Image (cartoon, rainbow, N blue to C red):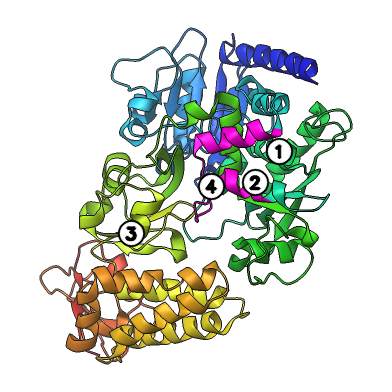
Amino acid sequence: MTAGFEQLRQAAEEQWDRLTASDTPVITVGTATCGRSAGALDTLDVLRGELAGRDLEVRFVEVGCLGPCYAEPLVTVSLPGAATVCFASVDLKGARKIAAYVAGGELPEDLALATTGPDSIPGIPDLMDTPVMKGQVRRVLRNCGVVDPGDIGHSLARGAYSGLQRAIELEGDARIAELERSGLRGRGGAGFPVSRKWNFCIDAPGDTRYVICNADEGDPGAFMNRSLLEGDPHAVLEGMIIAGLTIGAAEGFIYCRAEYPLALERLAVAIEQAEQAGFLGPDALGPGRPFRIKVKEGAGAFVCGEETALIASLEGRRGMPRPRPPFPAVSGLWGCPTVINNVETLASVALIFQHGADWYAEYGTARSKGTKTFALVGNVKRPGLVEVPLGTTLREMIFDIGGGISSGHQFKAVQTGGPSGGCLPEDKLDIPVDYESLQEAGTIMGSGGIVVMDERTCMVDFARYFLDFAADESCGECGPCRLGTRQLLRILEDITQGKGSASDMELLEGLSHNVMRGSLCGLGQTAPNPVLTTLRYFRDEYVAHIESRTCPALACRDFIAFEIDEEMCNGCTACAVLCPVDGITGDRDHLHEINAAVCIKCGVCSDTCSFGAVETVSARP
């Protein structure tokens, strides 16, 4: 098997060398979900169409998400004898300019984001010297936006499955020791040491064991796992195979939400290629030692991200959690010992065996080793997918990498950990992002979602939004979660509608702790985090809503009204035309007025006005 692998690797490296040192132009286009949502497929069609009619051979490569989602569609062009240039925000007009450049025209410097090869161009920075990339360490994401996820040769040329070959050569105890020395902790949120989880599974009685990849990424605003599956699926498969080899499993499952059609498509291709190459199949782990991987599509239930609920769904039952212990490592899928890790964890396993535990532990803190991917979203100038060493501060991520707050507004809060996480104020931005520091501040790392808010966000309403999500996603198995989240939601709704009372804050705190203590799984145990952290750090906003009947952020409908400034209004009629209830009157070129009795406070008038004439003002309910 090792000899066969060496032949595959050599052939792949030769293929990669021909691509990277091609005598013909090579154009790569980021066609992951984020790129497609920005029009990347149309951009690719225009590039193909513009160059098809010329007497010029061009190679096109579709790649995954590079990371700077704000700059999509991203197109990289490598011309023989010239620097490789990455172009950003390439719309159809930009695609035509790039096609002209490939055909011998001038470099469209207005579209150039960076150079990505050894050669440079004056005035255009290297990609890793750009502000969005400078603070990052690309390890888990090293292949995303670089390789064609549909071509196993690209991945092999950049080290894929070399970790598996090394793991096969090691004894079982040595594999666990390697993981333990690396300090890898689960990237799904809890941060449990991976070596300990795998050891529990090895020590559990039973002849049949399973490996499960949890790809049920359900946090609003999170897309780390999706991007990795779309951009580098072989890294995840390799990690699963190493897990199977280590714990003695012959079968693995990837539980991926059906809302990720492109990830599922690319996974299917990668699995087929891995089978053809012998990394999966009857002799994957050695002669007569099989390992196979199947994909299960989830139906979108957030609770199925919890291990026991995921197992129930895999077994064909309703996805509902069960009491633990026993933990899945001891009694999991069909009652057998089962290792469950998320997408990024398994990709990190592959890295550790490719490069060694010491290499992996070069970055991070004493108790949180390695790098971590984050989805940086919200009111930030440069949203996207980032990878930084654990221990990097929130301030560095938001202001250095993310470019600070968008549209000239002021930072107000950041939420980490998705619906299960909490909200932190500005004076907490300098804490290191690691498992212990975030937990001490009252939030969690979660799978890596980071939502940035400016002063226009009402923190009470923000907590209400995530309680609404948690209440809807509760499976109803246990009373504290089923009833408690609903009651928390009703209290928050009352406060945001001007119906709050003086005792509500104390009631929210007590009920939150009871829900956390009494809930069966992680959904209920963490759902009150947004409530508790906003009460802890933004208590003044609760007081304003309850005692003063005002919303400081002017965000809650029942606390605001819209007025037209007579000095700013020029009577263009745009607001009146778009008002859904015909609540704005006035003749063209004359001052308009809003009928407060009719206004439904949808905000269309404010969003529509190009002259800043529509003002949001405080109004008591």
The earlier-in-sequence mark between 3 and 1 is 1
Q: Secondary structure at mark 1?
A: helix
| Residue drawn at the location 76% of the way across and 14% of the way down | 7
Task: Please give left or right for residue 147 compared with residue 212 in the image.
Answer: left
Tell me if label 3 and label 4 are in contact, CB under 8 Å. Answer: no
Magenta stretch contains residue 30: no
The earlier-in-sequence mark between 3 and 4 is 4
The span from disc 2 to disc 1 (Cα, nearest Å) is: 8 Å
Question: Image height check: is 561 above or below 124?
Answer: below
The earlier-in-sequence mark between 2 and 4 is 4
Which is more foreground, mark 3 or mark 2? 2
Indicate the amino acid at tag 3.
Glu
Label 3 Cα crowd, 10 Å radius (few <14 / some 14-19 / many 20+): few
**Quarter of the figure with the N terminus:** top right
Q: Secondary structure at mark 4?
A: loop
Magenta stretch contains residue 192: yes
| Residue drawn at the location 38% of the way across and 40% of the way down | 366
Which residue has dot 3 on it? 440
Image coordinates for residue 15, horizontal then vertical, percent: 67, 15
Image disc number at residue 509: none
The span from disc 3 to disc 2 (Cα, nearest Å) is: 27 Å
Which residue has dot 1 on it? 246
Q: Which residues are magenta?
A: 172-200
Which residue has dot 2 on it? 198
Q: Secondary structure at mark 3?
A: helix
Label 4 Cα crowd, 10 Å radius (few <14 / some 14-19 / many 20+): some
